[in-house]
Each structure stands twice: as C-alpha cells, then as structure tokens.
Amino acid sequence: MSEQSLSQSQLHSSIVAMISLASGISSKHPDMGLCQLDRLRGAGIPEHQIDAVIEIAHHVRDEASQKLDAAFDEESTTTETSTISETENETSDCCSSAVSITVEEESCGCTPTQSGQSCC
C-alpha cells in the first residue's frame, strides 16, 4: 500500500478521539473518555461539538440499558418457574447457558436525543 493511499484511509485524529470518547461513554468504560476529551479540547474542537458527542453517547448508552431492562423484565415475567429435581440441581448451573433475549428489530433502532440530535 502506498504512503498516499495509507494516509487517505486513516481518520483524522479528532475524529478518532470523538469515536473513542463516544464509545467509552456508551460502554461505561472506567476511564470515561477523559483522555479523549482533553485531546479534543487541545485540538481546538468547539465545545458545542464535544457536547453533541457526549449527549449522543449518553443517549445510546441509556437507550441500550432501557431496552435490555425491558427485555429482561418481559422474559422474567413470562418464564415459568419449574421444579428442578435434586440430581438436576446438582449437575446443572442456571448461568451456564445464556438465555436468548430477542428485542424487536426496528429500522433504525434509536430515537433522537433530548435536544433532537440523531444517534443514527
């Protein structure tokens, strides 16, 4: 790959910092994207753009949590409790297999943030 095509395929450092900030916030990463926040401010990115990234990341994180909570609540109320025999209880672990939770697919899957920012 030539040097010119390599540089054309790389994202600008401020875009990488915005992506990293948003993913850190939305994934609840312990560092919370504070390093990227410093980089963005140091690069002269306007505060309103940084605020928009933060708002979208918070919205995506909160919406994902709400959908998972709703799916869990629905699954937990519709699952019948069955009696497990003592031998089954000794050999099985309720957490050894993941429960499949299906969330209805939507065309986009997200709603606008409180200020109207699109997260899609």
Image (cartoon, grey):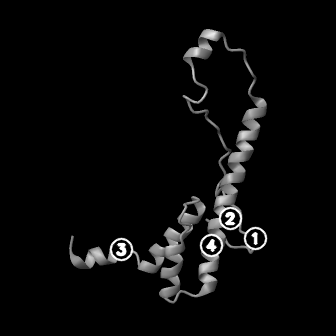
Q: In this figure, which residue is indicated by the disc labeled 4?
A: 54
N-term mark: 1 or 4: 4
Which residue corresponds to the image point at 57% horizontal and 58% vertical from the top-left?
Answer: 27
66 vs 93: above or below: below
Task: Kindly identify the amino acid type of the residue bearing the numbered disc 2.
Answer: His
Residue 26, horizontal then vertical, whole percent:
59, 62
Residue 109, horizontal then vertical, whole percent:
66, 56
Label drawn at residue 63 = none
Task: Say which quadrant the C terminus sits in.
Answer: bottom right
Q: Quadrant of residue 49?
A: bottom right
N-term mark: 2 or 4: 4
Residue 97, horizontal then vertical, whole percent:
55, 29
23 vs 98: above or below: below
CA distance separating discs 1 and 2: 8 Å
CA distance separating discs 2 and 3: 27 Å
N-term mark: 1 or 2: 2
N-term mark: 1 or 3: 3
Label drawn at residue 59 = 2
CA distance separating discs 1 and 4: 12 Å
Task: Kindly identify the amino acid type of the residue bearing the numbered disc 1.
Answer: Gln
Q: Secondary structure at mark 2?
A: helix
Numbered label tally: 4
Q: In this figure, which residue is indicated by the disc labeled 1?
A: 114
Task: Kindly identify the amino acid type of the residue bearing the numbered disc 3.
Answer: Gln
Q: Are marks 2 and 3 in contact (CB under 8 Å)?
A: no
